[in-house]
Amino acid sequence: EVQLVESGGGLVQAGGSLRLSCAASGFTFDDYTIGWFRQAPGKEPEGVSCISSVEPSTYYRDFVKGRFTISRDDAKNTVYLQMNSLKPEDTAVYYCAAASSGGCTSKTDFASWGQGTQVTVSS
């Protein structure tokens, strides 16, 4: 059974940092592309960042470029999202998701999702 568990969310002041973790089990982790998504109250979900498997390449949405860093530790079956210089508009539930094929593209099928972790940035 594919399982993804996010952790590391919390309440932080604007300008602060958080590191989210996505711990995976039940599949060959290093073969999978992992993405981070978020959903703010009243808004549609949106992609944030992504890291592919072989020769990992990374992708960031413009609104997090230079502030967020995605990385993966295949030995620990974990992907991280380091979030610096947080802004109130980063407030959302953050989800990680896994795709068994494809890199970080708009057509990648992220079939498995975690339960999410809340990030709240106060002004």
Image: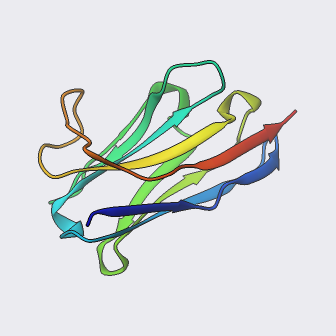
- The spot of residue 114 in percent (x, y) is 44, 53
Residue lying at the far right in this picture: please name it: 123
Is residue 116 something one can see in this rendering?
yes
Looking at this view, name the residue that lies furthest to the front.
1
Q: Is residue 33 left or right of residue 63?
A: left
Q: In which quadrant is the C terminus drawn?
A: top right
Q: Position of residue 115 (x, y in %)?
A: 50, 51
Residue toward you, 68 or 48:
48
Colour scheme in use: rainbow
65 left or right, relative to 100: right
**Quadrant of the rendering where the N terminus is positioned:** bottom left
Can residue 84 be seen from the camera position used here? Answer: no
Identified at 62% across, 28% down, the residue is: 40
Q: Position of residue 97 (x, y in %)?
A: 35, 48
Taking the spot 15% from the left edge, 52% from the top edge, the residue there is 100
Of 108 and 3, the residue lying toward us? 3
Q: Is residue 103 above or below residue 40?
A: below
Closer to the camera in the image, 96 or 16: 96
> Exactly how many numbered labels are in the figure?
0
Give x and y (percent) for residue 91: 69, 35
Q: Nearer the viewer, residue 6 or 36?
A: 6
**Residue at 78% in and 42% down:** 15
Residue most extreme to the bottom:
75
Residue 3 sits in quarter:
bottom left
Q: Is residue 94 left or right of residue 48?
A: right
Q: Is residue 54 left or right of residue 75?
A: left
- Vertical order, 42 against 13 (above or below): above
Where is 86 relative to 29, above or below?
above
Vertical placement of 1 versus 15: above or below? below
Q: Residue at x 66, y 25 (%)?
A: 41
